[in-house]
Amino acid sequence: MKLLITGGAGFVGDRLARALLASGTLAGQTITRVVLADIAPPRPDLLNDPRVEARTGPLLTQTEALRDEPFDGVFHLASAVSGECEADFDLGLRSNIDSTRALLDAIRFNVIHGGKVPRLVFSSSVAVFGPDPAVPLPAVVTDTTLPAPQTSYGTHKLICEHLVADYTRKGYIDGRAARLMTVTVRPGKPNGAASSFFSGIIREPLAGLESVCPVDASVSHPVSSPTRTVEGLIAVFEASREAFNGRTALNLPGLNVRVSDMLDALAEVAGAAVRERVRFQRDSAIAGIVANWPSGASAARAGKLGLAPHTNFAEIIRQYIEDCAAGPNADAALKGLSK
Amino acid sequence: MKLLITGGAGFVGDRLARALLASGTLAGQTITRVVLADIAPPRPDLLNDPRVEARTGPLLTQTEALRDEPFDGVFHLASAVSGECEADFDLGLRSNIDSTRALLDAIRFNVIHGGKVPRLVFSSSVAVFGPDPAVPLPAVVTDTTLPAPQTSYGTHKLICEHLVADYTRKGYIDGRAARLMTVTVRPGKPNGAASSFFSGIIREPLAGLESVCPVDASVSHPVSSPTRTVEGLIAVFEASREAFNGRTALNLPGLNVRVSDMLDALAEVAGAAVRERVRFQRDSAIAGIVANWPSGASAARAGKLGLAPHTNFAEIIRQYIEDCAAGPNADAALKGLSK
């Protein structure tokens, strides 16, 4: 089968591609080709796999050509993140809404002209939820909580959920939208996402660096490890239409954790000295965005697909350390960790 | 104040324009200009009012020029209807999503370049609601029921609700989305809306014509008269930001009525012979669409703005008859009514 991963060079996309290539099959079919479409090139070692093809450039410039190219499956992960969308309204509209619409229309064109209807997983986000005076936000958002986005990013994700549902209803795609929880621990550098610190306060201390937490220690939020997130995307892809149950988006599992719990887990796994590298300095812009995010989430529908969250944050930290230890930058990434 | 009404030559737009012109003021300000933008020209008598200006053509072709023209208020009613969107997917996307986006972006451009932030009322629809396997539809949908649209039209309305909310959050408009119930009794001819029969089964018999009801008599639905609908749009415009309460859409009031109740009311108001002109012949396409619509709606937030539904359908029929009697086509419209 031939797969397209948009955002295929991103953090989740790269992980997803590696998981799919390692498995070799998806939904019982052999994977023969994985096209990674991204504004940035994939990590070079991925290109050693003859099944992998990179297409580098904005998705919007790639969709015209996609009209004539059938895919068996699509993972649509490409997106501008929350901080970017708040800083540049046009960029957000273009990267998130226009690009999704162009991708869906390219597929529709192909299907109308006789192509096979591809299965498509869209990565939505817990950021669709937020408080509104008319819609109080529950402590734990469920699959059926009324979304009231408080950022452009959350608005775009919600809009695309409904585009995916309607293109599915019309038979142009077999689409499923899955809401990712905040993925942590991300390697590398901080990015433009308001949620960036959810990785930074673990990653930087482990690398021996100071880290600033821009929100209070009492802030709670549903998070998921990269591995569980990728497992979730694959399970949603592999689910039958009936098992997915309807066309509305579902929540992927998350561990509902406070910042203080995260830091306690860091001390438990890596020692008190590592945890002490985190200091609190409130950033009102970030704290304001995060204050409008859910403090917890449940994922009943994902549970029926066999998906479950981690049960404690120490597991997530240990997974990150193992991943780093096996990677090319182990020394730098784990410089702060006493052996 | 200078107002723009998109869809200003349509059924609701025409009524709204006349109500505003008759009042002469809106939100305490004198109305000096009413621009009616519509694909069709307004009824000629409206143009006798020196405050009225017609701009005829697709909204998408008009938005570029709107970038340099500030308005104090906008009623955005222009829309392709449900039947049209199901028949022509591209038309629906263009007329409903692209046009709304272009309108909002024209206003945003004006505001960014120093223009005043206009108040904007967007006419959404009860069609945003529908049943999904994961989201059972309650018998009565409330302001906070989770929308799960089952038509492209409902999808587009929901998407635009969230665009309006996000442009409002960013300060580009002072936007409010109000969900119209099915408006009946509409004069004139059947249109492409799946809900067209909700007017036809009253309008045609009163005109002495046979009418076919394409759904069962037990079908229930929230409806509103044209007058109450226009009152609702004006009240939502005039509400303070605080009184509107948040940025999520609200339901306008509707009378929850069964088709059989409508026909009983017709017999009560116009006599048994008129009611006998309606026969039932199921149209599975229309019945299928309508089966996915709510059987009732509540409107708690609108109630706090002083808005209420009619209490019985006979009132709505009597209003239609009075309107027809005062209009230019009274003889034809009421030909079936024994004097």
Image (spheres, coloured by chain):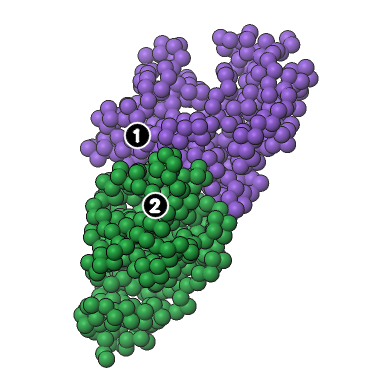
Chain colours: A purple, B green
Question: Nearest the camera: B309 or A31?
Answer: B309
Q: Secondary structure at mark 2?
A: loop
- The quarter of the rendered structure image containing the C terminus of chain A is top right
Q: Secondary structure at mark 1?
A: helix
- Give the answer, above or below, for where B188 lies relative to A213: below
**Which of the chains bears the disc numbered 2?**
B
Residue depicted at 62% across the width and 38% down the height:
A288
The quadrant in which residue B122 appears is bottom left
Category of crowding for the residue at label 2, using alpha-carbon neighbours closer than 10 angstroms: few (below 14), some (14–19), many (at least 20): many
Could you give the CA–CA distance between mark 2 and mark 1, rounded to whole angstroms?
35 Å
**Residue position for label 2:** B71
Residue depicted at 60% across the width and 53% down the height:
A133
Asked if residue A40 lies left or right of residue A179, the reply is left
| Front: mark 2 or 1 | 2
Question: Nearest the camera: B298 or A246?
Answer: B298
User: Do the dots labelled 2 and 1 sit on one chain?
Assistant: no
The quadrant in which residue B213 appears is bottom left
Q: Residue furthest right?
A: A272
Residue B80, horizontal then vertical, whole percent: 30, 55
Residue B306 in sight in this render: yes
User: What's under tag 1, amino acid-wise?
Assistant: Leu
**Residue position for label 1:** A103
**Which of the chains bears the disc numbered 1?**
A
Asked if residue A339 lies left or right of residue B122, the reply is right
Residue A209, horizontal then vertical, whole percent: 68, 15
Question: Nearest the camera: A93 or B202?
Answer: A93
